[in-house]
Amino acid sequence: MDPARRLGRAQIDVFAQLGVSTVLLGGIYALIAVGLTLIFGIMRVVNFAHGEFLMLGMYLAFWAYTLLALDPYFVLFVSIPVFYGVGLVTYVLVMRGVIHASHNVQIFTTVGLSTALQNLALVLWSGDFHTVRPWHASTPIRLGGTAFNLSQVVAFVIAIALTVLLFAFMRWTHTGRVMRATAQDREAAVLMGIDTDRVYRLTFAIGIAAVGAAGVLVSPLYAVYPTAGLQFVLLSYVVVVLGGLGDMVGALIGSLIVAAVEVAGSYFFGTAWKEILYFVLFIGVLVFRPAGLFGQRGAENLGV
Amino acid sequence: MRRRPSLTVVVLIALATGLAAVTWGQSVSGEYKIGVLEPLTGPLAGEGKRHLEGFEIVRDMINERGGVMGKKLAFVVADAPDPTAAASEATRLITRENVKIVTGTYSSRLCGAASEAAARHNVIYWETSCVDPRFNKRGLKTVYRTEIDATGFGWYNIEFIVKHLAPRFNLKPGQLKIAFISEDSSYGQGVTESAVARAKELGLQVVAPVEYYNFQTINDMTPIIVKLKQLAPDVVHHIAYTNDAPLFWRQAREQNFQFKALVHAGATGYGGSDFGKAMGNDGNGVFALLEPGPGFKLDSLKPDGQKIEKDFRDAVQKRTGSYPLGAHQLAGGGLWLLKLVLDKAQSDDPEKFRSAVMSFDLPVGTMINGWGVKFSETGQNSNDRVQHYMLQWQNGQLVTVWPEEFTTNRAKWIPLGAWDARK
């Protein structure tokens, strides 16, 4: 008999568990996607190296934990300025040269950066799978009929906080307004006296700081290895397009939708179906709402 | 009147001829190069590098023992992170480096493409590790495999479950409920399909269709676990590739999914050293079908086998400071057999090489890993000569526990108790 069709207490527990898993997995996806949506939305650059900065964040947590016995939650505070710096340097050395170039050039550049970073990690730290296991990673929490992991809850809470923070920053600060103006019309922004180079630099640095922090936060949950980023990055593009480019809250909701499709698809149809399901969803959104579920109409053409 | 050549010219000519003779001489009695193809970058690099290490250790052993065909064995190493690269690098080794033998490639994702390229050039392809069952079913005359194929893995696993586990659970085979989970590469599918077929033959209760997933994109196994938990299998047969093994184990613990045993096959996933490092004592009790690990009794082998196995273990110990890992054993065992074949054939001509391969008939217990040798016409070393062993994670170490006549260790935690009580 199909387990999903059994009735009663056990089934309620199953649905509660699937719900909890969806929310927590969505939190992890959101954590990774907010930085990407920021860079995507404002710079109009698809950062294919996004996953590799996530991987670097995971390695930072791993080495800090292994060599200095530092808890990832402590490393989190260090990682934000560190990756802000990494973002600035990457922007100046790599991205600035191609920011006004065609999309093809930008794609080649970021794909190249991605390959370079993966192989740098491979040379420096070998291809072995490492794990970070602080006490909270192996602390299951049982609530009602559901069970989950303390590290997942923390990642989720921080994902929400980060989204709200970035949303507020974009909405209510002067710098945020300047960033949105640049995203809407690069030329007009220049005419209004906005230093677009500075805006892009800042955007890229904030985006990378966010994904670096995400790497630290997911390190207790997933293995750390040079291509760890690939596991999440394709998914975060789906999330970003689903939510609407540059929309923080859209990214959060998009993450939850993708996670729901994944969890429910795995349970009802089998895990082999999960990618088919969320890519069908992705194509559907592109056909019917090309600006994303929450993006402004016409936003898909901006800056292209 | 012609001038006689001056002394200087004579001396120079003599020197040049001498030099030429020296260099010529070296290349005759000197090196014999083979191509080694492994994933050294990309997602498979971890195991690929350990395979290369295994090859290098045995290459040095071979050279200390007279090399191959009277020459020093040397490698031309190429990187094959994915099937496309495997095919193009195999071609490059053959056309540019002029090797007549290519060996490798650890992964079932790579060996098919690489061997196809070699066969096209009528070059010998000597596979030591991949287990894709389709590998030897293509009618390629120059393609050989020293390792078991995946159908053998599935067969051994079910054999262990029925003969060793079921009696200790006090269950008859027909009462035993088994669930299958597998990564979806040809390796996972090959092992799982043969295990499912064998399980059905023996009347085991297969509780659900096989749950396949992609090991590179799986981020959450909770839905699978929740589903299986309701079906309450006694044994979970899980073929994992990399990080999917610790992910399943961690989340099964979180969900308090109680089963009596988990069985895996191969040097990936639960069979890789990274699982032990990730889980420590929390990994206690997992079974993985592999080459022999600690506890393996040397004196259960034939005298020849004892000697070479001991030399091999010492060489690995010297280089890595530890007992041979699965990757070392596959690559090393395969390369040593290549040396024996080359010494017998005294040629890398595909025809002569083939008849030398076919002439070997060595019983179990004569080679590294306690293997025997008997190739079929398809170029596959027969599964029952490539003796495999069930290993179990016990306090951070994979130790040999079955068949019991080969080992001093015994399987523990049968059935697996509560998650926190497996000390």
Image (spheres, coloured by chain):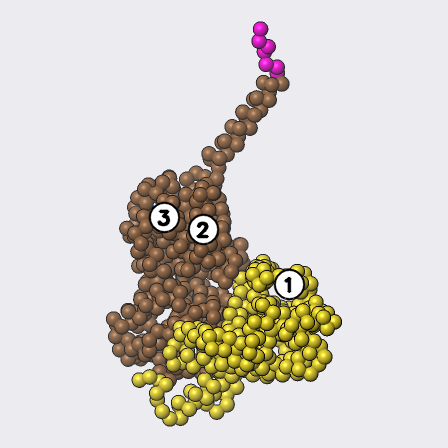
Chain colours: A yellow, B brown
In percent of width and height, residue A168 lies at 66, 83
Q: Secondary structure at mark 2?
A: helix
Query: Which labelled disc corresponds to residue A100?
Result: 1
Residue under pointer 3:
B119
- Range of the magenta residues? B1-7
The structure residue drawn at horizontal position 41% and vertical position 69%, both measured from the top left corner, is: B183
Q: Secondary structure at mark 3?
A: helix
Q: Residues within 10 Å of mark 2 (few under 14, many from 20)?
A: some
Q: Amino acid at mark 3?
A: Ala
In percent of width and height, residue A235 lies at 51, 72
In percent of width and height, residue B402 lies at 37, 67
Query: Which labelled disc corresponds to residue B31?
Result: none
Residue under pointer 2:
B88
> From what the image shows, is residue A144 above or below residue A191?
below
Instruction: Give the letter of the chain under mark 2.
Output: B
**Quadrant of residue B67 within the rendered picture:** top left
Separation (CA) of disc 1 from disc 3: 49 Å
Q: Nearer the viewer, residue A72 or B293?
A: A72
Instruction: Give the letter of the chain under mark 1.
Output: A
Separation (CA) of disc 1 from disc 2: 36 Å
Q: Nearer the viewer, residue B254 or B40?
A: B40
